[in-house]
C-alpha cells in the first residue's frame, strides 16, 4: 500500500480536517468507554503541536440523516477531548454554514457527520463542502475505513492534500503483516452473539489459522453442531449445518476448532443471575450458557501460550455481567501473556480490553469493528483505495 502519511506534509498554519473514529458508547449523556478517544488523542495533539488549525469530525451511532438527536450528539466527546488534551476543544454544530475561525494550534470538534444529509451516500456536494473547509484532509478512522461515505472517502477525493493519520497507518501496517505473512502457529478468537454476522470471517480465518476459538453465541452454535444440547442459550439453529461443515473442513485440513469443555450457565439472562459451572454434556434444557468455564479457559490458555500470532475479535460470554466475565478476562490475559504478535479489534473487544486493563499487553489494538473484520478477510477498504488514489 502506498499513500502519504501525516509526516509527509507540512501542517504549519494550514487548515487540517481530521476524520477520526470517536463513536463511543454514551448513556444518559455520559461516556462509558473512552477507548476510541484515548487512541485518537495523539493524532490531534500532533497536528496542534505542528501549528495546524485543526478540525475534527466523526460519526456517532446511527441517527437518521437530517434529523439531529441529542443522544447522538458529539458534545460530550468534545468535553472528554478537552480534558484529555488539557486544552479547550470547541464544539461546532454549524460548520457547513459558517467555517470556524481558528488560530494555529487550536482545534474544534464538529457535530456528528451523520446528521448531514448525503453523508452515507457519499454525496459529491457534501464531499466538496468538507474538502472546502481544509487545506489538508487526514483520514485516521480505521473503524470507518470500510464505509464509502463523504467524511471517509468523498472529502479525500476533492481535498488539496490528503494523507493517512498515524493511527490508521499503524493499524494497516500491523494488520497487513497478519494477513500477508503471519508468524505461526496462529490462533483466531472469534466471539460474539451470531455466526451470521461473521460467516465470511470464520471461513477465511479457517483457511489461514491453525486454531480457531469461537466464543459467545457463536460457540453455542458450534456446540449444537457437535450434537450438544445448549438449552435456552443464544444460538442459530439455521446455521448449525454450516458450523458442522466448518468442523469437518477443519479436520480434513489439519486445523482445530476449539470448543468449550465446561461452561457457566444461568437460569435467566440477568446481571444478578447466579453462575453455575457445568460440563457441556450436562447443559440442561432450561440452562442459558453465558460464559466458558475454568477448565475451558485453561485449555484455551495452553493453546494461546504457544501461538506466535493471535487475532482477537469478540468476547467469550456476557462479560458485562460480573458473574460471567471470567472467561473473557482469562482469555484476554492469555492474549496479553503470549509471546507473539496480538491484534484485537471490534467494539465489544475494546470494551473488554478497557474493563480488564489489557491494553499494554496487546501488540495492535484496532479501533475498527467492521473494518477490522473486512481487512482480515482480505477485502479492500474504500478509504484505503482513496488514499492510494490520491497519492
Image (cartoon, grey):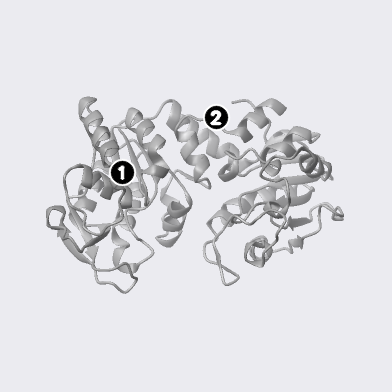
Residue drawn at x 68%, y 31% is 4
Q: Which residue is mark 2?
A: 380
In the drawing, does residue 333 fall left or right of residue 141?
Answer: left
* Residue 47 place in picture, x, y as percent: 73, 47
Q: Which of the two marks, 1 or 2, is nearer to us in this view?
A: 1
The residue closer to the viewer here, 82 or 260, is 260
* Residue 106 place in picture, x, y as percent: 79, 56
Q: Quadrant of the N terminus?
A: top right
C-beta proximity under 8 Å, tags 1 and 2: no
Q: Earlier in the sequence, mark 1 or mark 2?
A: 1
Mark 1 is surrounded, within 10 Å at the Cα level, by few (under 14), some (14 to 19) or many (20 or more) other residues, namely few
The answer to whether residue 75 is above or below residue 177 is: below
The residue closer to the viewer here, 120 or 101, is 120
Which secondary structure lies at badge 1?
helix
Which secondary structure lies at badge 2?
loop
Locate residue 310: give its quadrant. top left
Mark 2 is surrounded, within 10 Å at the Cα level, by few (under 14), some (14 to 19) or many (20 or more) other residues, namely some
Q: Disc 1 to disc 2, how far (Cα)?
A: 30 Å
Residue drawn at x 77%, y 37% is 124
- Residue 344 visible in the picture: yes
Q: Which residue is mark 1?
A: 238
The residue closer to the viewer here, 151 or 122, is 122
Amino acid at each position: 500500500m502506498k499513500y502519504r502519511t501525516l509526516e509527509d506534509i507540512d501542517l504549519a498554519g494550514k487548515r487540517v480536517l481530521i476524520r477520526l473514529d470517536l463513536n463511543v458508547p454514551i448513556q444518559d449523556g455520559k461516556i462509558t468507554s473512552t477507548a476510541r478517544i484515548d487512541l485518537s488523542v495523539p493524532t490531534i495533539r500532533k497536528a496542534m503541536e505542528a501549528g495546524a488549525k485543526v478540525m475534527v469530525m466523526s460519526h456517532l451511532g446511527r441517527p437518521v440523516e437530517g434529523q439531529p438527536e441529542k443522544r447522538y450528539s458529539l458534545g460530550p466527546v468534545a468535553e472528554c477531548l478537552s480534558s484529555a488534551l488539557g486544552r479547550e476543544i470547541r464544539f461546532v454544530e454549524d460548520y457547513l454554514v459558517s467555517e470556524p475561525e481558528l488560530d494555529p494550534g487550536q482545534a474544534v470538534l464538529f457535530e456528528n457527520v451523520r446528521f448531514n444529509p448525503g453523508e452515507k451516500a457519499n454525496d459529491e456536494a457534501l464531499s466538496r463542502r468538507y474538502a472546502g473547509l481544509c487545506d489538508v484532509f487526514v483520514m485516521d478512522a480505521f473503524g470507518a475505513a470500510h464505509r464509502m461515505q463523504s467524511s471517509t472517502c468523498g472529502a479525500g477525493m476533492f481535498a488539496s492534500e490528503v494523507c493517512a493519520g498515524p493511527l490508521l497507518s499503524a493499524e494497516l501496517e500491523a494488520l497487513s503483516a497478519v494477513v500477508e505473512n503471519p508468524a505461526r502457529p496462529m490462533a483466531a478468537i472469534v466471539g460474539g452473539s451470531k455466526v451470521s454476522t461473521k460467516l465470511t470471517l470464520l471461513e477465511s480465518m479457517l483457511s489461514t489459522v491453525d486454531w480457531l476459538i469461537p466464543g459467545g453465541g457463536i460457540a453455542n452454535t458450534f456446540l449444537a453442531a457437535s450434537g450438544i444440547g445448549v438449552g435456552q442459550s443464544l444460538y442459530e439453529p439455521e446455521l448449525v449445518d454450516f458450523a458442522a461443515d466448518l468442523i469437518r473442513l477443519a479436520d480434513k485440513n489439519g486445523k482445530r476448532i476449539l470448543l468449550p469443555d465446561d461452561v457457566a450457565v444461568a437460569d435467566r439472562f440477568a446481571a444478578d443471575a447466579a453462575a453455575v459451572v457445568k460440563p457441556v454434556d450436562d447443559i440442561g434444557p432450561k440452562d442459558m450458557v453465558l460464559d466458558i468455564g475454568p477448565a475451558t479457559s485453561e485449555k484455551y490458555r495452553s493453546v494461546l501460550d504457544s501461538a506466535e500470532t493471535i487475532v482477537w475479535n469478540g468476547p467469550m460470554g456476557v462479560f458485562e455481567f460480573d458473574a460471567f466475565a471470567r472467561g473473557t478476562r482469562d482469555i484476554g490475559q492469555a492474549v496479553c501473556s503470549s509471546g507473539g504478535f496480538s491484534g484485537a479489534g471490534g467494539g465489544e473487544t475494546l470494551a473488554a480490553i478497557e474493563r480488564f486493563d489489557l491494553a499494554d499487553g496487546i501488540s495492535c489494538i484496532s479501533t475498527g469493528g467492521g473494518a477490522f473484520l473486512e481487512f482480515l478477510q482480505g477485502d479492500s477498504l474504500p478509504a484505503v483505495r482513496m488514499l492510494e488514489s490520491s497519492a
